[in-house]
């Protein structure tokens, strides 16, 4: 009798261990993504397309987590599945290799239909802003425009990705100042070197001796956002034209090794 009970207990424990192992191995359900999310990511997000299978699964989990944490609200525009996926992809691409990254300084993304002005007016003639990290009352918000977000992903030749640009500003701002030096992810020993590289590169832009977008010479915060767009869109070209800047960005975004990606 005792032996039977012992056998039953062992069997019960084995079944329990198998069930727990199965639960752990099974990927977590993705609550925030539409049924066709793999198709959308494959069709439009080059970064995702070039990941291997486990990398893709990791990316999917990360964008799902982002969409659970950050509300996306359309303002005179509908935030459709495609917009939500593009915004989440732009948020995750720069921090893909940084485990446990949370945009603690962001609660909501407001999606406008097209460009707006500094008063968030969508109808005036002076509308030239395509994206903005909120300040003051909009401290925990980001404003993006549907047209530019879509353009950045659908038109693959376009090196401008407004959404990535704005998320880079948020990463930069995480240490308290938006100054082009993301101290939260850049090791202290490289800070002076990075500042020097930024000033030299900005001077080259001002002298007309650079292929980096002119907007990058506005100030160091804009330089960091513009050069990060370049880094994520055309890493090969950046590496050959600006090797020192490229290597420093590899340090900042930790893409030098262990990334399940083919092009970075
Ligand atoms: Zn900017």
Image: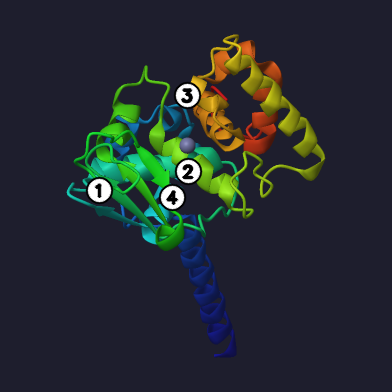
Distance (Cα) linking label 4 and label 3: 22 Å
- Residue 12 placement (x, y as % from top left): 50, 76
Distance (Cα) linking label 1 and label 2: 23 Å
- Please state, as top left, top right, bottom left or bottom right, where the C terminus lies in the image: top right
Distance (Cα) linking label 2 and label 4: 18 Å
The reply, left or right, for residue 38 in relation to residue 208 is left
Q: Would you name the residue on which mark 1 appears?
A: 34
Q: Would you name the residue on which mark 4 appears?
A: 61
Determine whether the beta carbon of the residue marked 1 sits less than 8 angstroms from the nearest atom of ligand 1: no
Is the residue 247 above or below the residue 180 in the image?
above
User: In this view of the protein, which residue sits in the foreground, 192 or 241?
Assistant: 192
> Sequence order check: which comes first, mark 4 or mark 3?
4
Distance (Cα) linking label 1 and label 3: 26 Å
Q: Would you name the residue on which mark 2 appears?
A: 167
Disc number placed over residue 190 in the picture, else none:
none
Residue 74 appears anywhere in the view = yes
């Amino acid at each position: 009798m005792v032996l039977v009970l012992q056998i039953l207990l062992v069997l019960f424990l084995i079944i329990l261990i198998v069930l727990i192992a199965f639960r752990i191995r099974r990927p977590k359900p993705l609550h925030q993504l539409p049924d066709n999310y793999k198709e959308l990511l494959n069709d439009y997000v080059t970064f995702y397309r070039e990941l291997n299978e486990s990398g893709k699964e990791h990316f999917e989990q990360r964008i799902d987590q982002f969409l659970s944490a950050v509300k996306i609200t359309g303002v005179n525009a509908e935030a459709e599945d495609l917009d939500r996926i593009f915004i989440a992809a732009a948020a995750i691409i720069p921090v893909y290799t940084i485990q446990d990254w949370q945009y603690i300084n962001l609660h909501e993304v407001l999606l406008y239909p097209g460009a707006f002005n500094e008063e968030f007016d969508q109808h005036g003639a002076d509308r030239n802003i395509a994206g903005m990290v909120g300040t003051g009352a909009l401290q925990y918000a980001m404003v993006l425009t549907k047209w530019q977000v879509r353009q950045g992903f659908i038109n693959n030749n376009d090196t401008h990705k407004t959404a990535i640009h704005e998320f880079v500003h948020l990463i930069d701002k995480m240490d308290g100042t938006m100054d082009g030096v993301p101290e939260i992810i850049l090791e202290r020993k490289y800070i002076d070197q990075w500042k020097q590289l930024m000033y030299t590169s900005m001077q080259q832009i001002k002298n007309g001796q650079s292929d980096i977008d002119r907007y990058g010479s506005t100030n160091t915060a804009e330089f960091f956002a513009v050069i990060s767009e370049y880094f994520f869109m055309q890493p090969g070209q950046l590496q050959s034209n600006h090797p020192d800047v490229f290597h420093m960005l590899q340090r900042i975004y930790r893409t030098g090794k262990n990334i399940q990606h083919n092009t970075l």
